[in-house]
Image (cartoon, rainbow, N blue to C red):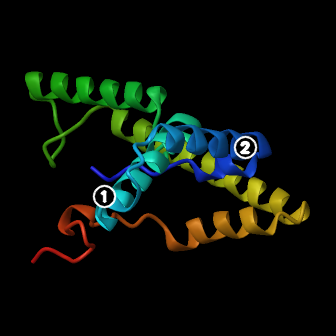
């Protein structure tokens, strides 16, 4: 499981920026002040805690990216129907030469998933086109790059806290 990120896009709003500043100042005021008695590590630790607490309270965490928007309850129902048809076929041993027959349930599922993928793709292309027309360059290229680069699983589990890979 990957780590969650802060919702830094919320900081685009002036109200959220001001609330974040105020929360940091409030938490910093409640942090113990011992002058130069503390070591640098302790001072950084207090600073880190204050910022993280303020970010948790004001900004919040980013929602995980949603993959496979075409995968929904209807797809699950189609898959369930296909699997039930397969179970029945295997119980009564009706199958073609390849050892299976489900009266088209597999084909319906495949067609449904392909249809949903095409709908999502068309929606993404329309959204990108609108962003290009509106001259929202940053959002436009963010969407285009997400499509060009595709999904790449992160290897966060294979790294230690310093970012070095664990061999």
Check disc 2: other Cα within 10 Å, few if <14, some if 14-19, many if 20+: few
Expressed as whole percent of the image width and height from the top left, the position of residue 8 reads: 60, 52
Residue found 39% across the figure and 67% down from its top: 152
| In the displayed structure image, the side of residue 104 where residue 155 appears, left or right | left
Quadrant assignment, res 148: bottom right
Q: Are marks 1 and 2 in contact (CB under 8 Å)?
A: no
Q: Is residue 97 left or right of residue 134?
A: left
Query: Closer to us: mark 1 or mark 2?
Result: 1
Where, quadrant-wise, is the C terminus in this rendering? bottom left
Element on which disc 2 rests:
helix
Tell me the tag on residue 162: none
- Going by the image, does 12 lie left or right of 101? right
Q: Which of 151/92 is in front?
A: 151
Judged from the image, the secondary structure of the residue bearing numbered disc 1 is helix
| Residue 70 makes an appearance in the image | no
Residue at horizontal 21%, vertical 61%? 157
Query: Between marks 1 and 2, how big is the CA–CA gap?
Result: 27 Å
Q: Can residue 97 be seen in this snapshot?
A: yes
Q: Residue at x 46, y 46 (%)?
A: 50
Answer few, some or many: residues within 10 Å of disc 1's Cα (few below 14, many 20 plus, some between 14 and 19): few
Frontmost residue, 111 versus 147: 147
Q: Nearer the viewer, residue 125 or 89?
A: 125
The residue at which mark 1 appears reads as 42
Which residue: 44% across, 32% down? 75
Corner quadrant of residue 77: top left
Residue 160 position, x and y percent, is 19, 68
Vertical comparison of 138 with 11: above or below: below
Of pointers 1 and 2, the one earlier in the residue sequence: 2
User: Residue 7 at what x, y percent from top left?
Assistant: 56, 47
| Side of 123 where 93 appears, left or right | left
Q: Position of residue 69 (x, y in %)?
A: 52, 43
Identify the mark at residue 18; answer none if there is no mark: 2
């Amino acid at each position: 499981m990957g780590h969650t990120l802060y919702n830094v896009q919320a900081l685009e709003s002036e109200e959220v920026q001001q609330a974040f500043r105020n929360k940091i100042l409030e938490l910093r005021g409640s942090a113990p002040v011992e002058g130069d008695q503390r070591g640098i590590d302790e001072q950084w630790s207090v600073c880190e805690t204050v910022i993280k607490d303020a970010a948790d309270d004001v900004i919040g965490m980013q929602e995980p990216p949603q993959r496979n928007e075409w995968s929904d309850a209807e797809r699950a129902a189609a898959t369930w129907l296909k699997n039930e048809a397969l179970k029945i076929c295997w119980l009564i041993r009706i199958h073609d030469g390849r050892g299976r027959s489900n009266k088209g349930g597999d084909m319906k599922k495949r067609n449904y998933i392909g249809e949903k993928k095409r709908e999502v793709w068309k929606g993404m292309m329309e959204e990108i086109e609108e962003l290009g027309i509106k001259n929202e360059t940053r959002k436009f290229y963010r969407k285009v790059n997400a499509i060009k680069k595709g999904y790449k699983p992160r290897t966060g589990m294979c790294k230690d806290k310093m970012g070095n890979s664990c061999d």
